[in-house]
Image (cartoon, coloured by chain):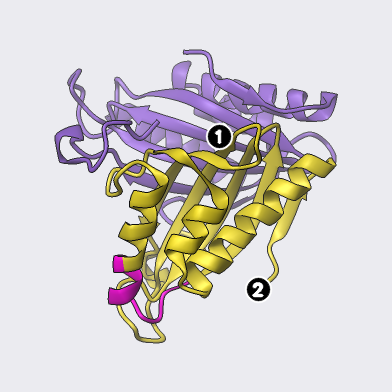
Chain colours: A yellow, B purple
Amino acid sequence: MKPLIIATGDLSKKNVALVLGLYDLMITQRKAKNAAQEYLASEYIQHNPTLPTGAIALGEAFTEFAATHPKLRVEVHRIIAAGNYVWAHVHFINIFSNEANDRGIAGVDIYRFDDNGKMAEHWDVLQAVPDPDTSANTNGMF
Amino acid sequence: MKPLIIATGDLSKKNVALVLGLYDLMITQRKAKNAAQEYLASEYIQHNPTLPTGAIALGEAFTEFAATHPKLRVEVHRIIAAGNYVWAHVHFINIFSNEANDRGIAGVDIYRFDDNGKMAEHWDVLQAVPDPDTSANTNGMF
């Protein structure tokens, strides 16, 4: 799917392209170590509490994760950029199972870029997508 | 606390101020119905699966929620704006208990503004903050 891109200015548009490139190389192409090397500052500060800090550690951790989640994919629904930040509203699918009915996890990833155009810090918030039959509205999480 | 504001341009800065105003009136001042009336478009589209859609419904639902969460407060850590969007990285505290050690919920709220400067659509992702002793890094979720 094509995300809604909310960005003005050349630097923000470039940073959006870098984050989309990270998802593509790390998740779609499953080259997590290459992705970490290409896109992340070596001193990458990780705030996701399940992941170790640092770029090399992320490449290694995600390589293991991908191996146990062979159908994992990500859909980027909307992505906003300003200053040296990019925030992405994403849907990780086939994370609980390999079945087509896996509802997946909704997330927002927050990336701070350094002056060299590398991602230097990352925060996220993740939530399992609930059964829509239990929802108080019919709008979906995205 | 004072949030990091990531916004350029008058409209984005104004929209950030409106979202901070919504949190203040709805959560800090506990005037949810007034906040909904002041800041939201009447046809407010709600994507949080636990809340009904519409501005009036949110004001009513949050009034009930506040009544059962007397110490609830929100800290906005960082907030980004571009185009007609504002995204906020927030920490809801005293949501699981009224005790000082309540770790709370991390969230990102996404607001889309209409052409009248009202919030017309809202998405969020929410995650309980884990015990830091169980974290794979020492950086915290914020």
Taking the image as drawn, is residue A138 in sight?
no
Q: Position of residue B12 (x, y in %)?
A: 77, 30
Q: Residue at x 50, y 34 (%)?
A: B89
Provide the residue span drawn in magenta.
Answer: A64-73
Q: Is residue B30 left or right of residue A130?
A: right
Q: CA distance from mark 2 to mark 1?
A: 24 Å
Q: Is residue B79 left or right of residue A91?
A: right
Residue that mark 1 sits on: B88
Closer to the observer: label 2 or label 1? 2
Q: Position of residue A65 (x, y in %)?
A: 31, 67
Give, as a three-letter code, the residue at label 2. Met
- Secondary structure of the residue carrying numbered label 2: loop
Determine which quarter of the picture holds residue B69. Answer: top left
- Most extreme residue toward the top is B1
**Residue B68 forms part of the magenta stretch:** no
Q: Which of the chains bears the disc numbered 2?
A: A
* The N terminus of chain A: image quadrant: bottom right
* Crowd tier of the residue under label 2, counting other residues whose Cα lies within 10 Å: few below 14, some 14–19, many 20 or above: few
- Most extreme residue toward the left is B133
Residue A1, which numbered label?
Answer: 2
Q: Position of residue B135 (x, y in %)?
A: 22, 40
Give, as a three-letter code, the residue at label 1. Ala
Q: Residue at x 37, y 78 (%)?
A: A102
Q: Is residue A98 above or below residue B32?
A: below
